[in-house]
Image: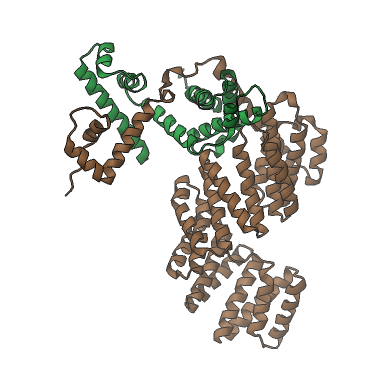
Chain colours: A brown, B green
Amino acid sequence: MIHHPTTEEILTLAMAAGGHNPEVDKHVSSCASCSTELDDLRSLQDVLRDPLVWDQNEEATEGEEVGWLRSFAASLQSEDEAGAKFLEDLLRRPESRWRLEVGAEPAYRTAGFVRALLARAQTGSDESPQQALAMATVAAEISEVLEEGLYDSDFLLELRGTSAERLASVLTRLGRLPEAHAALDRAEKIFDRLAIPDPPLARVWYLRAVLLQEQLELGRARELATASAVVFRRFGELRRVAYAQLLAGAIDFQSGDFEGARDTFLRLVPVLEDLGDRPTLAGLYQNIGTCSMQLDHVQEAQLYLSRSSDEFRELGMHAEAIRTSWALGRLLLRAGEREQAVATLSQARQRFQELGMRSDGALVALEVAELLLISGEEPDQVLELCSEAVRTLQGAGMRGGVATALQYLQDALRTHAVTVDAVRELRLQLSDVVSPPPSM
Amino acid sequence: MTKYPTPYSVSDAAGDLYRSYKAFLIRVAGQKFCVPDDEAEALVHQVFISYLRSGSSVQDVRSWLVGAICNASRQYWRDHAKDEKVSDAGKGLYLRDEGTEDLLVQKLRIRDLLAGLNARCRQTLCLHYLEGYTAAEIAEKLSTTPGYAEKLIHDCSRRARELTRKAERR
């Protein structure tokens, strides 16, 4: 058994004081952990020689100096509270009149109201991207007319840049990519004039990476995602670091580097656990499961997809939970567990219907029907599943290729001559309309 | 009637943060980036205003404040690079020097950890490491024996190391 010297003995060595034991010296020079401890002690001593660490007695005193910051924080808070009330007021009016109402009412022209609009545009962009766009547009317009004398110039610049940034984010969600790029260009130009430009510029790089990923410019997207993560880390914005790395992993996945993507995602698990960000963690599990599926690590994929589904369900994100179960059903099929796959997919179909997500339910129903057709089992159930899907999709008023494929399957149903090809064609047409199970 | 304490507000938190970090940040701007004193103070004000606007997205406040003052100082020199009065050395200060922020954050952490030592220990370490006092000189200053001063330096260094190690484990 190796006897390492005590901290006391290593400290004596670090202090280069007389009387240290030559045996200790000998041990430390050949022992990795003890020489690390010695290095750490020496680096601590170096730091202690820097005047920066000894400014305890120079703390700013209470009074005018601290007062200005306190009053700034208080006015920011009260303006935000008033802005939130203005927003509730605006939301009660028709969206088509927002710009008019805001233009006519000077009371709305406050930074607090702009921030309230921007915050709501961000949280609401998933549920209602059009409304989020209207909010970001109004916010951008108000930020341009705020009185310069009322606010600090950097404060105004940041508000204007953030409005352009949020506009870009919503436009990306709506698939209006050239406009989103233009909004980001504007945000970048504004942020570059700030006294502290790097954090908002990193947000622009992150969003640009999302845009470029959509446009399949994966190399440049990857570079920007990584660059933004570096800046976020430097500024201790750890949640944003995780998001930028998550994006980098997704880009790797899209580039076909499943192994690299999986490694990135696995490294992020403890980070998101520490941050307590459960919705993102649930999505991360889903990503890991999907990578594992691509790498044919069936057990691992099953583990992470189940974990993701459970987590989404616990969070009350039922639609996401079902989508993950859907992916799990496909995995089981790939692993040759046909019976279990049919059971899992059937359960997903039923849950979609319970949630009123009929088109998604119809797509899963067709997937189950196709499986049963291939194996030649349960012809009655095949007919039932296909009829149900046709009814649902007709009710949803599908057009184009889906309508043609739907008609084809309906004819086949009438003559009880449903084929794998007829079901598959409709399913493939539908995949473009209905969100497929998660791939990333 | 029972008197309830006033709730801790955003403005209290801002004030506390300012009191704790203002001096350190001014020194960083002044010593590391040679920003003139009055300008350094203005940059620190800007750092706190900017922090208040983005505070909710920041998980590591020390890193943010250090990153922001370094960024603001470099930006200051970038903006003044065309100024003929600024020396060439000053003009080069806007360039990023990898590792500067990490080292400064480490120093800020240690500075905060030293507050966990008792006053005598802080004084001993400050005299020894910063002022360069020997054990004999510390003994004279603290009216004690050189042997005891030697022991104090040793014990307090060990305590400082224990504090940093505990923080690393967290």
Give the percent coordinates (x, y) of residue A370: 60, 80
* Side (left or right) of A240 relative to A101: left
- For the question of whether residue A128 can be seen, the reply is no
Establish if B108 lies above or below A127: above
Residue at 19% across, 38% down: A24
User: Measured from the top left, where is residue B4 in percent x and y?
Assistant: 47, 22
Kindly identify the residue that appears in the image at 56 percent across and 87 percent down.
Answer: A376
Left or right for B108, reference A435: left
Q: Is residue A313 visible?
A: yes
Picture coordinates of residue A93, whole percent (x, y): 77, 42
Going by the picture, which residue comes out furthest to the front? B88
Percent coordinates x, y for residue A166 in the rendering: 68, 44
Q: Quadrant of the C terminus of chain A?
A: bottom right
Residue visible at 24% across and 45% down?
Answer: A30
A93 horizontally vs B98: left or right? right
Total marks in image: 0
Q: Quadrant of residue A69?
A: top right
Nearest to the observer: residue A185 or residue A167: A185
Residue at the spot x=81%, y=46% of the render? A96
Residue A317 in the image: above or below residue B20: below
* Depth check, front residue: A290 or A310: A290
**Residue A356 figure quarter:** bottom right
Q: Is residue A63 above or below residue A187?
A: above
